[in-house]
Amino acid sequence: MIALGTWPTPIEEAPRLAARLGLDRLLIKRDDLVGLGGGGNKVRKLQYTCAEGVAAGARMLITSGAPQSNHARLTAAAAARLGLGCILVLTGERPADQRGNLLLDDLAGAEIVWTGDRASDDVVAEVAAAHSDAYVIPFGGTSATSLQGYVDCARELREQAGDFDHLVVAVGSGGTMAGLVRELGPERVLGVHTGAVPDSRTVVADLLDLDPALLRIDDSQVGAGYGTVTKAVREALRVTARVEGIFLDPTYTGRAMAALLASGLRGRVVFLHSGGLPGLFAH
Ligand SMILES: *Cc1c(COP(=O)(O)O)cnc(C)c1O
């Protein structure tokens, strides 16, 4: 493991939002405040994947994602911090404006390769073959090794949060939820499907070699698809900003909060703020 962030991240009471939701207690775990590159959950995973890359002698990191990938932005920042080169393979065509995460990718010095209509994996393989000193980090930074980053987070939560009934977390490539479930068990962790992968339940269960039926997944917040901003998400962003002064992102944490608002959950809840704010500025 290579330290890239500032640990432990803070945890904060959200009493006004708790009252509004009828919860006994709401705590927000601030993994948007990890220190590196604008923050977010990908830093905990990158601490493990980057360590593997450096141990393998890599001078360059390659990864892939959607144009507004938070993982790509944080890989660019991690590469800068470690003195490595960085190539990001992003899906589709280069947009006219370099907004949100794309602006930050460029500031951090990453080279961007657009896939056009080709499969991302094919383009990654081609770019990797042309750079013998490169280390390829998988989609979303999720691997059997890197989910350990969220085992680490779950251990921080044990210290900081005391007893709680539910932990609400957005699911993309699945590593974040998988690490939390590995340490805390499946009963208390509620994953909110974002549409980043076709089936969150299978992805997380496969990472853990667990019966998928044991996992709690809320499928209600995808709307018209991963890249779209739903009415419920707009409302969740507004409520959280107006009641607690905390900004969420439209793709992941906005969906997770929208799910919590609609859930009717009771008791003591922890909400994982997994970052992603730069993506808001691409909408
Ligand atoms: C990637 C991401 C997630 C999901 O994490 P996974 O480990 O890929 O499931 C949640 N929130 C934000 C802001 C993200 O960027």
Image: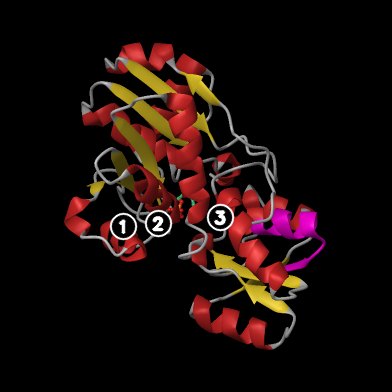
- Considering the image in quadrants, where does the N terminus appear? bottom right
Q: Distance from label 1 to label 3 (Cα)?
A: 18 Å
User: What amino acid type should be assigned to the residue bearing mark 2?
Assistant: Gly
Q: Is residue 248 above or below residue 41?
A: above
Residue 252 or residue 50, whichever sits in front: 50
Q: Earlier in the sequence, mark 1 or mark 3?
A: 3
Confirm if mark 2 falls within 8 A of ligand 1. Answer: yes
Residue placed under numbered mark 3 in the picture: 45
User: What amino acid type should be assigned to the residue bearing mark 1?
Assistant: Ser
Residue at 43%, 23% in the rendered image: 27
What secondary structure is marked by label 3? helix
- Residue 94 image offset from top left, x and y in percent: 63, 66
Confirm if mark 3 falls within 8 A of ligand 1. Answer: yes
Instruction: Tell me, yes or no, whether the two marked residues, 2 and 1, touch with CB atoms within 8 Å.
Output: yes
Q: Is residue 6 above or below residue 159?
A: below
Residue at 65%, 82% in the rendered image: 128
